[in-house]
Amino acid sequence: GNQKGNVLSAFFVGYFCTQLLGGYLARRIGSKATLLIAVAMWTTFDALTPFAARLGVTWLLLDRIGMGFGEGMLFPTQHALSSYWVPTHERAFLITFMSSGQDVGSVLANAVTPHLAEAGAWLVFASWAGLACLWCVACVFLGASAPELHNRCRQSGEASWIQQHRAA
């Protein structure tokens, strides 16, 4: 019981430590880069979970802390990103919509993971890591930290409209 609680709570040790760092990095190097770093970090630790578990509880605790380090940067980075991309009058609705995606993802994961686990625990971690890698590739090619850095938004005039209607 206690060991399981320690492993589960280790995630929040890392998560707590990177909240401010996520916001700082998003403003300093850009939301896109910070989000990619965060996703790459938590995905790497997530994919390593089965190996860490085989090495013992200490390694699993460190793995969970590392996963928390990555995920801790997510919310501050999302808010920095939305301050550039979302016009002030749409911010409340769109941030709620954006944040609810994590809840939908949790429900989806709870429905899909048991089926993946039937084929082996490694498949669970490999599948979610694979999806995260696909997301990273899409973000690299399609994402931008701000509309004025996104070619299609600049060319269409949307970037200037968003700049006029945001408070960042």
Image: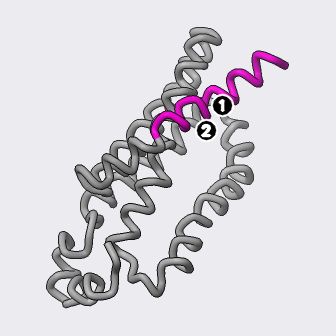
163 lies left or right of 98: left
Residue 23, position as x, y percentages in the image: 39, 50
Compute the Cα span from label 1 to label 2: 7 Å
Q: Nearer the viewer, residue 28 or 38?
A: 28
Span colored in magenta = 1-18
Residue named by callout 1: 120
Residue 76, position as x, y percentages in the image: 45, 54
**Which quadrant of the rendered structure holds the C terminus?**
bottom left
Q: Are marks 1 and 2 in contact (CB under 8 Å)?
A: yes
Residue named by callout 2: 124
Residue 101 magenta-highlighted: no
Residue plotted at (58% across, 23% down): 50
Determine if residue 43 is in view.
Answer: no
Residue plotted at (74% across, 53% down): 111
- Name the front one of labels 1 and 2: 2
Q: Secondary structure at mark 1?
A: loop
Q: Nearer the viewer, residue 58 or 110?
A: 58
100 lies left or right of 38: right
- Quarter location, residue 5: top right
**Which quadrant of the rendered structure holds the N terminus?**
top right
Residue plotted at (27% across, 63% down): 145
Residue 129, position as x, y percentages in the image: 48, 41
Magenta: main secondary structure: helix
Disc 1 residue type (three-letter): Gly
Q: Is residue 83 above or below residue 33?
A: below
Extreme-front residue of the structure = 167
Q: Secondary structure at mark 2?
A: helix
Disc 2 residue type (three-letter): Val
- Quarter location, residue 93: bottom right
Residue 8 magenta-highlighted: yes
